[in-house]
Image (spheres, helix red, strand yellow):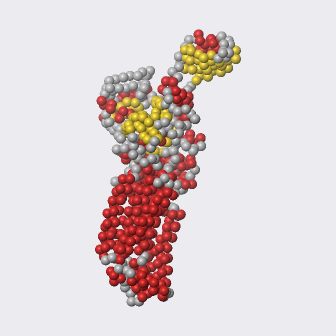
Amino acid sequence: MNWHHVKTVARTDLRQLIGAKDFWVPMAILGSMFFLVIPFVLLISITSLGEVEAVAQVSQAIKVLPAAAQEQIIGDTDAGRTSYALAVFLFAPVAIVVPLTISTAVGSSTIVGERERGTGEFLAHSPAGAQEIYMGKLIASFVPGYATTLVGFGAYSILVNTVVGPEVGGWFFPTPQWWALMLWVMPPFLLLTLSLVLRLSGRVKSTAAAHQASGLVTLPLIGVAYSQSTGALFGAGVSSLWIGLVAWVIALFSLSRGMRSISRGRLLGVAIET
Amino acid sequence: MSGAQPSRRTPSSAAADSRSVLISCEAADLLQLTVNSVELPEMEIDVQHAPEFIIPKEAVAAASPTGTPQGEGVFAPNGLTVAVRNVSRSFGEVKALNDLTIEVPTGRITVLLGPNGAGKTTAIRTITGALAPHEGTVQVFGVNPIEHGEEVRSRCGVVSAKPALYDRLSGWHNLEYAADLYEVNGNKAEKIREAAARFNIEHALDQPVGGYSTGMKTRLALSRSVLHEPDLLLFDEPTSGLDPESAHAVLALIREMTATGTTVVMCTHHLAEAEGLADRIVMLESGTDLIAGAPEDLTARYWPQAIVKLQCTEGDLAAVHELPGVLGADIAPDGLRAEIRLDHEVRIPDIVGTLVEKGVRLTKIDPFEPKLEDLYFAVRNEAREQGKVGEVE
């Protein structure tokens, strides 16, 4: 594997994304909605506006959390405990939906897009290997989703600490489980999804078909990723490590299969290689 | 070589040795000079039919003032940069290539000529190893492009029928992408500027390619193809979508490139483009090669005799039958028009003079010089008669 080729393909794809306002503006709005706007509205209504009904509803939800999770909740007041639980446990989908949505949008069109624009011809004749092109495109699809998530995670941390922190005795976020979720559990789920999406992108005939097909693949994976992430947040320390480990093994297996599935023929848009 | 005659020496194994360089020339005197300047091993030289021969690098090095063989690594064994032999490639039920054979001599322009769907693009893709043949063998620079893909492709520059540029990137970033993929050595920025200047597109490098005209895109694609100084250039309809002036400029640049020893393969269905540009043509039809060779050799094969068309207003052209050098003539019933076959075109002035002396008032003397178009249709007609080409619908 020539990593110079991988880096070159990834960098060029990212450069095109950065230049495409019509792509990153909606994605930035999506990230802002999930990481900032929705959490802010919910948390502020509990902590500052004293939304009694909302506190009561979330308190009921907290009671169904696993014991290990309930033990972690801190705060002296109902509003404090409720907002803590909300911030730490109930926004897990944020960490999953945003990167998967963004990366899938990028990844689904990456190979079929080269074909539609005719640039697949250039890549097919270039010295870069098919697997290097695949890896470059995988990285270029992974980075926007993961980077948005990390930036959103940082912003979310500041928001949560600012809004909920005073209620629970100071800055508390990210918790160790959130660190594990962001750095260990979420990346393999993202890679697993992308490995499937890129394979689809190499097989379908148009970008529109790629989006449709990748939606079908991504939705169940979002469900799985969400449940596992929630489990990682609710569980004790090592559970997230195990969930992450299994996810990494599956993701790496899927990646190796994905790399073998790509060929120059697919970049050229000719019939399936025999 | 004064009065160059085909000369043959004993074949030598050195000629097929990969540790050799190929020297070619068009001027016979230069050939003689070159032959005399190095100590040649015994080898086969056929000056008239293949003005290229191979000598060991050591021999060139010994003759070179610097002791360094020129063009090292550029040339392939047997003087061929590309050897496609009996290649077939199907896409499902469609046979894109069918027992195709193409030989591309080093440092020459080989034109793949054929109608749409003849297999020209698939042939290019097979040469770079982008597509694997189902049958047959492909050798580029003496190696199999499927097994040595990176090695082969890094020495090829390709311009496809569509410019294949990234519209969202600037011209500069498009070239930089290629420079990085092809791992251009030295001053990358300088080389990008040089390549762009060569095709007069340097002024637009900062603009997004999406705003380029078709001609600008083609020129940028051409710049990209030469950026890494490839040994083999593959152009698939390079003038597609260009106005005549731009197309002419592009063709002139392609000719210029071979001056530095670059081998060019160009696909086209425009006969006028190939005329005068091709050192060698390969006519394709339905994925197979109908005929291949130097245009002048091929026309000589189809029209071995000189032909002149005459027209007059008075007299009888039937008199030409008796004139020396006339091999045959088709005379119109009125005797005012004739197509005359001669043993050599130098006879024409004498024939004209004799006819005038006999009172024939000639109004038209038209020596027939077969064009590529004539050759193209002659080959296709012959192939059609042999059942190799389908009837035009």
Q: Is residue B297 left or right of residue B183?
A: right
Q: Quadrant of residue A96?
A: bottom left
Can you give x and y, in whole percent of width and height, for residue B34 in the image?
38, 29
Judge whether B384 appears above or below A264 on screen.
Answer: above
**B265 or A53: nearer the eye?**
A53
Q: Quadrant of residue A9?
A: bottom left
Judge whether B70 appears above or below B2 on screen.
Answer: below
Q: Residue furthest bottom?
A: A76
Can you give x and y, in whole percent of width and height, for residue B205 in the image?
52, 53
**A51 or B232: nearer the eye?**
A51
Residue at 56%, 39% in the rendered image? B248
**A262 or B270: nearer the eye?**
A262
Can you give x and y, in whole percent of width and height, for residue B172 in the image?
49, 54
Residue at 51%, 21% in the rendered image? B304
The quarter in which the N terminus of chain B is drawn is: top left
Count every numbered label the image shows and give the total.
0
Report whether residue A179 is seen.
no
The quarter in which the C terminus of chain B is drawn is: top right
Residue at 46%, 63% in the rendered image? A215
Q: Is residue B55 left or right of residue B200?
A: left
Residue at 42%, 85% in the rendered image? A59
Q: Quadrant of residue A216?
A: bottom left
Report whether residue B304 is seen.
yes
Can you give x and y, in whole percent of width and height, for residue A18 in the image?
48, 63
Q: Residue furthest right?
A: B313
